[in-house]
Amino acid sequence: MKATRQLHDLGQSLWLDNITRTLLDDGTLARYIAEDSVTGLTSNPSIFDAAIGDGAAYDAAIHAKALAGLEGENLFLELALEDLRRAADLFAPVFQRTAAVDGWVSMEVSPLLAADSAGSIAAARQIHAAGKRDNLFVKIPGTPEGIPAIEEAIFLGIPVNVTLLFSCAQYLAAAEAYMRGIERRIDAGLDPRVGSVASLFISRWDVASNKQLPPELHNKLGIAVGQQTYRAYRQLLDSARWQKLAAAGARPQRLLWASTGSKDPNAPDTLYVTALAAPNTINTLPEKTLQAFADHGEVRGLMPIDGGEVDAMLAKIGEAGVDIDALALTLQQDGAQAFVKSWQQLLQRIADKASALDDKSRGPALR
């Protein structure tokens, strides 16, 4: 049995951290679903920037939409949602079979809104309405300004994938926002069943900290933060507050492991997949990591619910000079800035392609 299937059978969902039109057109995504137990996917500006810039798969659609008067963010939104609707339809059987627990795809609000609560809420409403799929998450960053937007989106019944979470404290803030949104729905007599996941980024911790740490502590911090957060997640699900919401029909906001591709060439390429095996969680895998784990991955047991030796590990890393709390804030800020850069590059790439395709269609005599 493939290791991907073993994880699935243990109760962990495997989602693809990628989407391209080519993956949809050539049947690769359908094959991942059938053969590698993939039950959802995520997207972000960096993924779409690479997808649209790689080859000509989007050229015809860009040209047609530009001729129809679309440009900038509106043109991109149409391109992205075309792909995500197709992916959502591929995952619809999973969504139905699991009663909306699994089978989701995700679309991110503009990274330019990371510090704009009202703008994020408006964008979430627009994407939710335009997406026209029940299994489409709107991704909102778990920045301080994003937390009110997350609560309001949940209250409005918009499924939310909280992104750019790096620490246990940041996760708990997102979980609080989710629960407040659900509590407000219950108080208003609304259906408490609104889907949500909270995405904790893992590998970027180690990219940032390895250079400060002795070799024996390399690639330990990301996993330790994951273990600490998983403990908090399980404690929250056991809390009286959550049990009351669950009794009213609410669904848990599942914990999702993001950024799980190994960045250290000296580390196993399946490092974070093996280490983060846990039921009732999600692991979003870059394509190379999915292929590697399907080929030679191993399941070596589940994460301890109580965190195991995580406190001792975090103490060692702190003693070695890493200010974990400060680094969490830096990683979130840097992550938001990186998505802004990708977003701006993406929109410029689309504008350049639209212009070049228009010139080409006019022919030399009309230039």
Image (tube, rainbow, N blue to C red):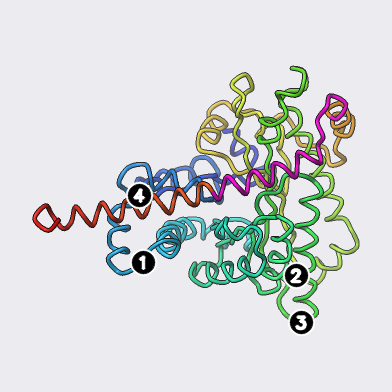
- The reply, left or right, for residue 210 in relation to residue 71 is right
Judging by the rendered image, the residue that carries numbered circle 3 is: 188
Q: Secondary structure at mark 3?
A: loop
Q: Amino acid at mark 4?
A: Asp
Q: Sequence-wise, which precedes: disc 3 or disc 4?
A: 4
Specify which label sits upstream in the sequence, 3 or 1.
1
**Who comes first in sequence, dot 1 or dot 2?**
1
Measured in 3D between alpha carbons, the distance from the residue under mark 3 to the one under mark 4, in whole angstroms, is 44 Å
User: Is residue 163 located in the magenta-colored stretch of the structure?
Assistant: no
> Which residue in the protein does label 1 denote?
70
- Camera-near label (1 vs 2) is 1
Q: How far is the residue under mark 4 from the one under mark 1?
A: 24 Å
Task: State which region is magenta.
Answer: 318-340
> Is 321 covered by the magenta stretch?
yes
Label 2, on which residue? 181
Q: Do labels 4 and 1 touch, CB within 8 Å?
A: no
- CA distance separating discs 4 and 2: 38 Å
Three-letter amino acid code of the residue under disc 2: Gly
> What type is the residue that disc 3 sits on?
Ala
